[in-house]
Amino acid sequence: MDGHATSDDCGYKYRRMSGDAAASIRAEVLGSDVPNGYTTVAQADRIGATLGIRPGRRLLDLGGGRGWPGRRIAERTGCALVLADLPLEVLRAAEPLSAGSVVGRVCADGSVLPFRDASFAAVSHTDVLC
Amino acid sequence: MLRECRRVLEPAGRLAVVVVEPASGLDRAALAEAVRLGPSRITTSAPIRDHVEAAGLRVERLEDWTAELRELLLHTLESMRRLERDLRAEEGNDGWDAELSRKERLLEGVEAGVLRRTFLLARHGASSTRA
């Protein structure tokens, strides 16, 4: 694929539209106030269902920022979520999941992932750099 | 990035990708329009499906989510204009202008038929069968 994300690209993506009025629009339009792309709650649920991930298995949400849609998928399926993105401040802002799931936050470039081979049951990659 | 996704997936693992990309079958002028109107790092070298398959993943499902994106953009733009004063205060005038313009361009690209939003589900595996 052409195009390569930088930390500045990603940081800008999350800094824009980060206030209360913007959050109210996302809550109204997407059903979620987490700033990340164009994935609605219904679409997040569809992604989770098609991934077929089970409780306790590991999901990597690549470019998942503050946790959308990975957090929703983890809360619905009970899988263990790992968020990977470039801006550290965004990963730190990811809210904890409800009981039963674990959040790992990893500052990483998608082209060189710091994980062992075959370490995830599923990977989601939605609206990265949209 | 997609090869890294394949590497970290278990042998039966699945990858879900959602991406805004150029519509299929565009001529050179329409592709240039997709680049002008689309996301800043839109992939133009090939459809996402080809990139996923080239990474050694087997595509199981491909869906067009463009209609949902259009509805979402229309709704978002309507809400942004309604809350313009608050958003200008939060984002600054330049930020407001840039965000409104970005979403208007994306909607224009969708309505012109040069941009689409694709959902793709793939499974770890070397071979591939086109749908």
Image (tube, coloured by chain):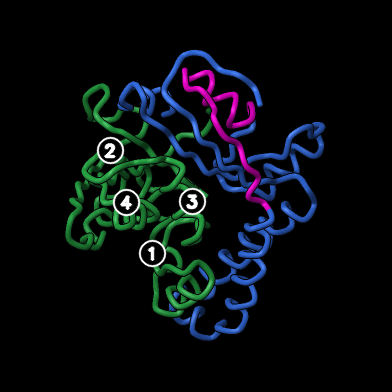
Q: Residues within 10 Å of mark 2 (few under 14, many from 20)?
A: some
Q: Which mark is residue A34?
A: 1
Q: Is residue B49 magenta?
A: yes
> Which chain does tag 1 point to?
A
Q: Residue at x 21, y 61 (%)?
A: A96
Question: Residue A117: which quarter of the image?
Answer: top left
Which mark is first along the chain, 3 or 1?
Answer: 1
Q: Mark 1 falls on what kind of element?
A: loop
- A57 vs A76, left or right, is left
Q: Residue at x 65, y 45 (%)?
A: B64
Which mark is first along the chain, 1 or 2?
Answer: 1
> Which chain does tag 2 point to?
A
Residue beneath label 2, please?
A108
Of badges 1 and 3, nearer the viewer stands 3
Q: Mark 2 falls on what kind of element?
A: loop
- A110 vs A102, left or right, is right
Q: Position of residue A86 (x, y in %)?
A: 31, 44
- Magenta stretch, residue numbers: B45-66
Residue beneath label 3, please?
A46
Q: Colour of chain A?
A: green
> Which chain does tag 3 point to?
A
Do we see residue A66 in this rendering? no
Q: Mark 4 falls on what kind of element?
A: helix
Residue beneath label 4, please?
A77
Q: Residues within 10 Å of mark 1 (few under 14, many from 20)?
A: many
Q: Colour of chain B?
A: blue
